[in-house]
Amino acid sequence: MRILFVCSGNICRSPLGEQLLRAELGAVDSVTVESAGTIAQDGAAMDGFAASQSVRLGGDPGPHASRYLTESIAASADLVLTAERSHRADVVRLSPRASKRAFTIKQFARVLDGLEPDDLADVTSPEQLVERVARLRGTVAPPADPADDDVDDPYRRSESTHERVATEIHRAVATIADALRAIA
């Protein structure tokens, strides 16, 4: 399974999600985790504050180099996790078939949290998990403010903003990793 994290520049939020999920999954060989950005310049290093947060939370920012999101990158992902709803819209514009497997990071975690144990009882693969969450996403109450499914952009903001954003991403990624580990 290929999981793709998407944000704007691919130097803060999406590489953080990628690195933290990779760290959470550990030796789960059946999952590949990547990231890209809707306005990224290929080859940029991760933002320093974001990289520090990755290390703090168990990630490895060392090998990261940003890359621009293309149609082929979006189309090849089995699950796309975006920082914001606008990034999800960008992914779907590039690859309309991705609509059923694209979520914001926080939305996917929120839906997982809102499901009943029986909802996933017969799920035996990561691909089935994505299909089930897509099918049941409408059964879980949305946030009162749709923006609550977005992760704020910390770029060029304070270290405390980066810490808050990293904590939000880490919380969502931990929920997602738990679900994947349970079936992988």
Image: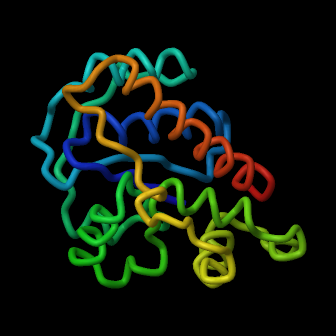
Residue 170, above or below 93: above
Residue 167 drawn above or below residue 81: above
Displayed quadrant of residue 140: bottom right
Write the residue at 47% across / 29% down: 164
Image: 119 above or below 151: below
The quarter of the picture where residue 134 lies is: bottom right
| Residue extending farthest front | 144
* Residue found 44% across the figure and 34% down from its top: 165
Colour treatment of the image: rainbow
Q: Residue drawn 26% across and 26% down?
A: 46
Residue 75 in the figure: left or right of residue 112: left
| Residue 142 picture quarter | bottom right
Q: Is residue 158 left or right of residue 170?
A: left
- From the viewer's side, name the closer residue of 47 and 25: 47
Q: Quadrant of the C terminus?
A: bottom right
Q: Quadrant of the N terminus?
A: bottom right
| Front residue (pair 33, 145) | 145
- On screen, residue 57 versus residue 97, left or right, reads right
Percent position of residue 155, x then y = 23, 32
18 vs 129: above or below? above
Residue 175 drawn at (x, y percent): 68, 48
